[in-house]
Amino acid sequence: MLSVKGLKAEVDEKEILKGLDLDVGAGEVHAIMGPNGSGKSTLAHVLSGREGYEVTGGSVSFEGKDLLDLDPEERACLGLFLAFQYPVELPGVNNTYFLKAALNAKRKYHGEEELDAVSFMRLMKERLKVLHLDDSLLKRPVNVGFSGGEKKRNEIFQMALLEPKLAILDETDSGLDIDALRVVANGVNALRGPERSMIVVTHYQRLLDYIEPDYVHVLAKGRIIRSGGKELALELEEKGYGWIVDEAAA
Ligand code: ADP
Ligand code: MG
Ligand code: MG
């Protein structure tokens, strides 16, 4: 589904990603862990096509297409979903309206009919039920005044509506209490499926108590320096990152 080869990227002329390799197959859940400042969010942003990140080397293919050739909207329409570490607030934009516009943009791209208001409400209700969420966030402006936990709930709901092929969740556990963490994890688990892949970026092992990854990668200094199964996350929790970084340097 996703194949990243030798990816190099700069921010403000500073090289952050220094030849990163990552392969994600259909239906797989990959966790990316690593020290602060190692480039995890940069990777997420480069994959989403965010402005200000200059790719200087390597390649990214997404379902056989050259991802780096596509603008961010096309990436989203093709099934890439990014939950940001700091979600954008849109004062004056009703959340339901925003979600409907996002979903219909995607449908239009694929030559499908737009959903009318009634069908959209039906779909929203069904997805809220799957995630065990209520509709309290839907009438409010997008992310405005949402608590950290509410922003994450909203992202998970966006994901449930948009049904991405590849979802990238960045630092979903930062600032979340255990209940919010469970909502996010339950959402991720409810949306897991043979055709849907996920990359979960996290500092802490804690989130992985609820989301069981198929693979765990350590990103340090702009590269994936170790990959393993879920037991690697436990080892990191116990021993930290230093030993792997030292081994990689040697
Ligand atoms: P992580 O998510 O792993 O904590 P980031 O990808 O956020 O790491 O950051 C990696 C490095 O890139 C850090 O040294 C950070 O200071 C730098 N960086 C990230 N974004 C910017 C930016 N917009 N301008 C300058 N430097 C940046
Ligand atoms: Mg960080
Ligand atoms: Mg980050």
Image (cartoon, grey):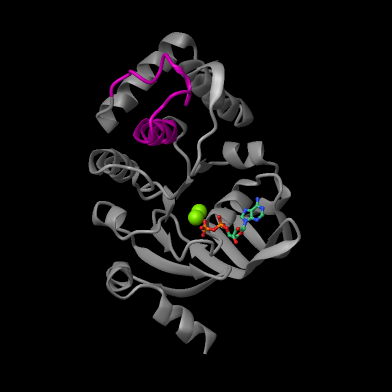
Q: Is residue 113 visible?
A: no
Asked whether 67 or 188 is in front, the reply is: 188
In the rendered picture of this protein, how many numbered marks are placed on residues?
Answer: 0
> Who's the residue at 49% across and 68% down the image?
219
Question: Magenta segment: does it hold 181?
Answer: no
Name the quadrant containing residue 212.
bottom left
Asked whether 159 or 165 is in front, the reply is: 159
Horizontally, residue 65 falls left or right of residue 213, namely right
> Who's the residue at 38% across and 21% down the image?
137
Up-down relation of residue 20 to residue 246 (above or below):
above
Q: Is residue 71 visible?
A: yes
Horizontally, residue 10 falls left or right of residue 166, namely right
> Who's the residue at 41% across and 32% down the image?
151
Asked whether 63 or 192 is in front, the reply is: 192
- What x and y, as percent, mark residue 76? 58, 39
Question: Magenta segment: does it hold 140?
Answer: yes
Horizontally, residue 237 falls left or right of residue 60, namely left
Up-down relation of residue 95 to residue 183 (above or below):
above
Magenta stretch in the rendered image = 134-160
- What x and y, as percent, mark residue 147? 38, 30
- What x and y, as percent, mark residue 222? 58, 68
- What x and y, as percent, mark residue 94? 50, 15
Name the quadrant containing residue 70.
top right
Horizontally, residue 107 falls left or right of residue 175, namely right
> Who's the residue at 60% across and 52% down the image?
47
Point out the residue furthest to the top here. Answer: 118
Up-down relation of residue 240 to residue 92 (above or below):
below
